Image (spheres, rainbow, N blue to C red):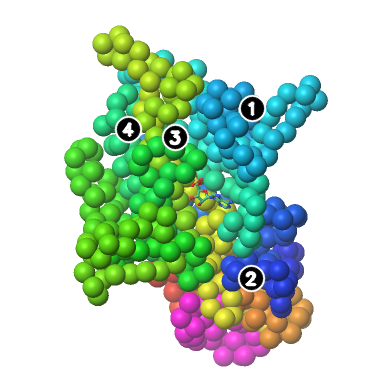
Amino acid sequence: MKMSRFLVPTLKEAPSDAVAVSHKLALRAGLIHQEAAGIFSWLPLGIRVLKKIEQIVREEMDRAGAVEVLLPTIQKADLWRKSGRYDDYGAEMLRIKDRHDRDFLFGPTAEEVMTEIVGAHVNSYQQLPVILYNIQWKFRDEVRPRFGVLRSREFLMKDAYSYDLDEAGARESYNRMFVAYLNIFARLGLSVLPVRADPGPIGGDLSHEFMLLAKTGESMVYADDRALGLPAPGVPPEDRAELQALVDERLAPYAASDELHDASEYEARVEEGHRMEARGVEVGHIFFFGDKYSRSMDVKLDGPDGQPIALQSGSYGVGVSRLVAAIIEASHDEKGIIWPEAVAPFHVGIVNLAPDKEEVSALANKVYNALEGAGRQCLLDDRKIRAGGKFADMDLIGLPWQVVIGPRSVASGELELKNRASGETVSLGFHDLIARLTQGSAGN
Ligand code: P5A
């Protein structure tokens, strides 16, 4: 992509109402455009990051045996009346009337919609377990939308729902999602800690939040620091007991966020020297709530003995749009964003210092074509602006690699390659540069 044809409206200063660093940088790097409080448009760089996160979440859900569907954003109020949540949900629910004066709402979550689908289309216990997921925009009329897409009113959520015949099966589904979440966050390059959590309005008796540690996080996390930095579990064991053991190991011996934190238990369970108290951003939240929705919505299946059984369920959320901001919170410096390779909007930024000079542009195009041909996504800065502005913009938008090409590169045959995260710079000839960026550390 050539920057002269792209839309990257970078800003030197963030608007004064942006306080969180991720909000400031998302606006300054031209990722998002605010439409109203807590409602954003996604600009070209922003949507590329959002789609990459979405795709990683999708691949890990598929790998865990979950099946994708797409539910509507607009839901019938009657479904929520049936579950009993319509009145309980309160002012966070955006209520809508259609032209016939019928009640609808913009979905804040979809336990009811999914449970009704399962009731209508899953006919036999032999089709269980089933885990369905949906990546769709949600709306919650938050009292204080803030920090940009970190806490917005409209946001993209991956929400999965599991249906099992019995509680042991449902806990296995819960554990499969737990492991899938660890794999998702590891692929995103994030250090995320699962902690015990309060189920809140979703309900149930078992719940975990996945907290990304970041200085500006809204919640406090208390944990044994040895729970951090563990490798991704990868493919989970088939065996139910082994799977449970894996989940227990990842939770041991203490990890809680402020709501459920118990200081005396913490001190008893975690040795001094391993106690970690840090701020975190909730990027995922999973719930086991048994037959709460299947019972209230009367979704039953005949069990193996012919007796009707209300299904056992859980729901599993990832804040896909929140992750864009959360990743920035966790990965930036004073110059701007530092995207992890897996979600970077482009892998390589090519800075053409002299777009007016034919030989320089020819060399920049040659590098661009070679990298794109090898599957590396490049953003070529061919704008006719001063060099300082180009360097500042490249650092601000945070692509993992920068290649700088000017008249001197043409003369010497040496190109400058900079790693955004480390700041390290090397001079390489054309072939070495292409080799470096298409294999090994730069690859994926
Ligand atoms: C789980 C899936 C649920 O809604 N129902 C379906 C359950 N859980 S949750 O914790 O309320 O939300 C899941 C994740 O969505 C993100 N999220 C938000 N992101 C941006 N702005 C918001 N206002 C917002 N609210 C929730 C979080 O990442 C949360 O973990």
Looking at the rendered image, the quarter that the C terminus falls into is bottom left
Placement of 51 over or under 313, stated as above or below: below
Kind of residue at badge 2: Val
| Residue 221: quarter of image | bottom left
Kind of residue at badge 1: Ala
Does the beta carbon of the residue at mark 3 sit less than 8 Å from ligand 1? yes
| Sequence order check, earlier mark of 4 and 1 | 1
Q: Mark 3 near mark 4, Cβ–Cβ under 8 Å?
A: no
Q: Which residue is mark 2?
A: 19
Q: Mark 2 near mark 4, Cβ–Cβ under 8 Å?
A: no
Given the current orientation, which residue lies at the most extreme top position? 306
Gap between marks 2 and 1 measured at Cα: 36 Å
Q: Residues within 10 Å of mark 3 (few under 14, many from 20)?
A: many
Residue at the image point whose x is 77% and y is 24% from the top: 101
Q: Position of residue 314 (x, y in %)?
A: 40, 35
Placement of 388 over or under 155, stated as above or below: below
Q: Which residue is mark 3?
A: 161
Residue at the image point whose x is 36% and y is 28% from the top: 312
Q: Residues within 10 Å of mark 4 (few under 14, many from 20)?
A: many
Q: Which residue is mark 4?
A: 170
Q: Residues within 10 Å of mark 2 (few under 14, many from 20)?
A: few
Looking at the rendered image, the quarter that the N terminus falls into is bottom right
Q: Residues within 10 Å of mark 1 (few under 14, many from 20)?
A: many
Magenta span covers which residues? 402-428
